[in-house]
Image: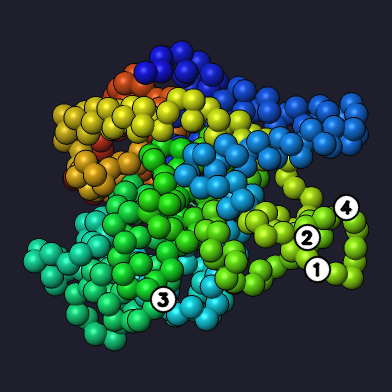
């Protein structure tokens, strides 16, 4: 088991802030920052002399990502962010049917498909839960927003309505932190002849990802959140069979098998996912991502997930003590690093907390608290103490109930 207090020392921001906002931006470790900086030091001192070494480091970063998500390196492409990957997915899967998603997706999962003219169906989330199977209790609550009828729908029911299509779904929802059972979703998708596109940005780096076990066709991830790699690079997984089956909708000089031939007449594309790396790469960001992925693997994703569970248990206990409700599902199998605290006036509260150097986000009528392995109980105590004081001072205002906190 990692010595978490020692690990924490590698994340300098935690000395200054009570940082509970990894779902917004993960804190970058000293060595990850150094990996990115090293590129600029080298290009500043030596120009392109280190090019061969840089390309090898890109290869190593790809290998680290592949190991982290259970893929082969040939199935991993570096992209700028999740949106970039989703756009490639939406272009690639044109003609494969309509899109099925849920109403609580981050727009990155929906805008690229809507923009390409796909019909997108939104399954309802009920109290933060996105049902795969319908249950008696869900009847009348779950539903498919864009369908013409108001009949209750789970994902299975919505899939059953069409012979094929594309399910686009996040591993972890950005506001509530609901963690979906992606292996079960993948099984459903296969049974119903749907392609399965996963947005893993809010889960990868914190909870296990196994794209093969899930049966994902495509998975897209940004490096900025739970991967703790900063801005500029993300990655996408594309299943090998898909790479063979579908024509590449984009290509550039670096997409071809031998770019250094500088051939401007023929297009012989790489067979790997790297064909979507069209030209010069954002090397510093990729080096940071590779370093962060290696650190994640060294700590062990299982250990990280366990650490997050322990911290969120403690947060839930402390919230109960100050009588502040939680909007996230508390079912152990659906919990993640995100806890949505139900409080009106969240925007103003978050601003007040920020003045006290407590970093959290305001999301959908609540405060989103996100806990990664580098947090500790002291962070949670600091947050609870500040929040408790703000909430009780809000209650003391004449005529004010919880709703007057803003
Ligand atoms: C689930 C999810 N996907 C993606 C993103 C960010 O998208 P991108 O990587 O395109 O900036 C966010 C940001 O909050 C998110 O919550």
Mark 1 CB in 8 Å range of ligand 1? no
Q: Residues within 10 Å of mark 1 (few under 14, many from 20)?
A: some
- Left or right of residue 107: residue 36: right
| Quarter residue 358 falls in | top left
| Residue marked by disc 3 | 165
| Residue marked by disc 4 | 260
| Residue marked by disc 1 | 267
Query: In terms of sequence position, does the residue under pointer 1 or pointer 2 come before the other?
Result: 2
| Residue marked by disc 2 | 256
Tag 1 near tag 2, CB within 8 Å = yes
- Left or right of residue 374: residue 34: right
Query: In terms of sequence position, does the residue under pointer 4 or pointer 1 come before the other?
Result: 4
Foreground pick, 335 / 406: 335
* Structural distance between the alpha carbons of marks 1 and 3: 30 Å
The residue at 89%/70% (across/down) is 265
The residue at 71%/35% (across/down) is 57
Query: In terms of sequence position, does the residue under pointer 2 or pointer 3 come before the other?
Result: 3
Residue 44, x across and y down, in percent: 87, 30
Mark 2 CB in 8 Å range of ligand 1? no
């Amino acid at each position: 088991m990692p010595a978490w207090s020692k690990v924490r020392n590698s994340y300098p921001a935690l000395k200054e802030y009570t940082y509970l906002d990894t779902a917004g931006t993960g804190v970058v470790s000293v060595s990850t920052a150094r990996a990115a900086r090293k590129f600029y030091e080298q290009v500043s001192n030596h120009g392109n002399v280190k090019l061969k070494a840089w390309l090898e480091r890109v290869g190593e970063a790809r290998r680290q990502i592949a190991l982290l998500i259970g893929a082969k390196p040939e199935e991993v492409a570096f992209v700028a962010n999740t949106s970039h990957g989703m756009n490639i997915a939406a272009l690639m899967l044109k003609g494969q049917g309509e899109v099925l998603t849920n109403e609580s997706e981050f727009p990155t999962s929906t805008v690229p498909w809507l923009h390409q003219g796909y019909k997108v169906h939104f399954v309802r989330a009920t109290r933060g839960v996105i049902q795969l199977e319908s249950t008696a209790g869900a009847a009348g609550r779950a539903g498919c927003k864009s369908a013409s009828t108001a009949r209750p729908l789970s994902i299975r029911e919505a899939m059953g309505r069409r012979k094929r299509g594309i399910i686009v779904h996040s591993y972890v929802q950005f506001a509530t932190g609901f963690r979906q059972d992606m292996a079960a979703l993948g099984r459903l998708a296969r049974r119903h002849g749907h392609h399965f596109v996963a947005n893993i940005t809010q889960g990868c780096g914190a909870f296990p990802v196994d794209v093969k076990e899930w049966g994902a066709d495509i998975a897209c991830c940004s490096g900025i959140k739970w991967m703790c790699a900063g801005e500029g690079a993300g990655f996408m997984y594309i299943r090998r069979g898909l790479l063979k089956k579908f024509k590449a909708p984009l290509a550039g000089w670096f997409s071809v098998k031998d770019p250094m031939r500088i051939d401007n007449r023929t297009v012989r594309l790489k067979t790997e996912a790297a064909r979507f790396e069209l030209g010069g790469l954002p090397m510093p960001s990729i080096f940071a991502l590779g370093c962060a992925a290696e650190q994640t693997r060294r700590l062990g994703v299982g250990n990280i997930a366990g650490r997050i569970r322990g911290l969120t248990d403690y947060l839930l206990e402390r919230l109960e003590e100050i009588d502040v409700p939680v909007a996230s599902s508390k079912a152990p199998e659906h919990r993640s690093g995100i806890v949505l605290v139900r409080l009106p006036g969240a925007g103003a509260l978050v601003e007040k907390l920020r003045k006290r150097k407590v970093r959290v986000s305001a999301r959908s009528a609540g405060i989103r608290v996100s806990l990664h392995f580098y947090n500790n109980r002291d962070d949670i105590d600091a947050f609870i103490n500040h929040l408790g004081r703000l909430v009780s001072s809000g209650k003391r205002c004449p005529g004010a109930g919880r709703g007057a906190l803003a």
